[in-house]
Amino acid sequence: MKSREVEVAAPAKEEKTVDEGVEVKEEDETETKPAPKKETIWEWVKVNTAAPLWRRPRADITEQEYQDFYKNVLRDYTEPMDYIHFKTEGDVEFTGLIYIPKQPPGDMMRLDYNTNLKLYVKRVFITDDFKDLIPSYLNFLKGVIDSDDLEINVSREMLQHSKTLDAIKKKLLRKIIALFQDMATERPEKFDEFYGKYSTSLKLGVIQDTQNRDRLSKIIRFPSAKNVDGKKISFEEYVTGMKKGQENIYYLGGENVDVLRRSPLIERLLKRGYDVLLLSEPIDEYAVSALERYDRKYKFTDVSKDGLNLKDDEDVQKKLDEQFKPLTEYMQTVLSDKISKVSVSVRLAKTPAAIVAAEYGYSPNMERVMKAQALRDERYFRGDQKHVMEVNARHPLVKKLLAVVESDSQNDETANNIRTLHDIAVLNSGFNLKDTSNLSDRVNRMMALALNIDPNEPVEEEVIVEEEAAEPQAATKGEKTQDEL
């Protein structure tokens, strides 16, 4: 709006008509005329003649304009990682311009984090704090949504119960997930960068977003035991490399990928040509548990739990169970306070023994994650659950223990060896050992025997020489002693 001043002239003097025979007295021509008046007139001036960027055709917008809009309007100092500009038609129409930030916001996982999506109705800004527009796992996105189908004079409460907004949200999510899928298939290098920064958000979406769970499951990636180069693979790539007749997707959770790759729980699986997904992030097992099956066909199987079936020869397995029954029963007696049962393993190839969780219990990784939660509910977490011990029937240590038990020559030393074998299996399998002092005592005893030292030989006593108390130094002139102070 601007103003301008104009001069308004004084009204012209009226001419008088004179009838004949009437004397008219002429007025003085030197009489001053009235000064013109000044009036201020306000006018509207259109300053911005350009249409909003998101309303313009994509073909008319340059890459630099997209970048400038992101930096200036959406307030970021870096360029976006990627973006999508679209317009939907049909039962509901709206325009969207969505950006993926190059760096994830540091506080995006906070419950009170404000989204960076701006909602417009008929090009009029409504709000930028509208959490119902996108789910929380996508709150790192920035952009603009503009619709002509919403009423402009509505409250926020009315928007939250709007069926039109629900339709917008549904289509918006599909467009965003389609952008992720396009990156994964057409621009794998860009997707690797994106996944390295936002993988936790995508896995959180698998847990929370039941409607788009199948779509998101095709995007997430995990390292595997066979890919030693560190490459992460999708479920589809895993299924493509399956053995003939394989119906399960095997996975193992833990704290470190390199440690998981050397776990005794996957020895025989790898030896027989199976691949195993290695879940090293705390959220991984939650996401896989939410899926249950991939493509509604392939079941996810945790190799750290009891009940693993590798389709071995049942007759051979029954023979091994019967052959090692004296040993498993004796071990069950010795370790009755720590384990629920002892069985002959189907998953071990090189290691003598391993510990696995009960079929419906916590895996070692989930047990570790649950214990680390400061606000865990003790009613739903049982930290004292007993595990299952499996022994490798082909390992010489196990064969020797069987021979000792069958000859009835077992003694306290045999029991100690079994306890040591159990404690080492606990550590190798990823569980936490509750009492490490007993294990260290037994290991020290075995080292002494190996070095021909009497394990009961006492430790040499240290001679402690008490130092005499130092005499107090004389105070110099002008200083006070401690007693005087």
Image (spheres, rainbow, N blue to C red):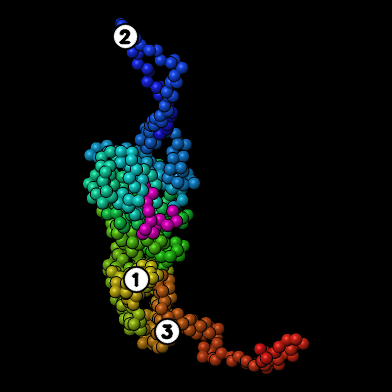
Of 126 and 62, the residue lying toward us: 126
Label 1, secondary structure: give it: loop
Amino acid on which the number 2 mark rests in the picture: Val
Q: Residue at x 31, y 61 (%)?
A: 289
Residue 376, numbered circle: 1
Judge the density around disc 3: few (<14), some (14-19), many (≥20) Cα neighbours within 10 Å: some
The tag earlier along the polypeptide, 1 or 3, is 1
Judge the density around disc 1: few (<14), some (14-19), many (≥20) Cα neighbours within 10 Å: few
Above or below, 377 against 73 in this view is below
Amino acid on which the number 1 mark rests in the picture: Arg
Residue 262, picture quadrant: bottom left
Range covered by the magenta-colored residues:
105-117
Residue 22, numbered circle: 2
Residue 416, numbered circle: 3
Closer to viewer: mark 3 or mark 2: 2
**x, y percent for residue 227:** 44, 55
Of 8 and 320, the residue lying toward us: 8
Answer whether residue 113 is magenta in the image.
yes
- Magenta stretch, main secondary structure, is loop
Closer to viewer: mark 2 or mark 1: 2
Q: Residue at x 43, y 43 (%)?
A: 73
Q: Give the total of numbered labels.
A: 3
Residue 353, picture quadrant: bottom left
**x, y percent for residue 326:** 32, 81
Q: Residue at x 54, y 91 (%)?
A: 457
Of 206 and 57, the residue lying toward us: 57
Judge the density around disc 2: few (<14), some (14-19), many (≥20) Cα neighbours within 10 Å: few
Amino acid on which the number 3 mark rests in the picture: Asn
Quadrant where the C terminus lies?
Answer: bottom right
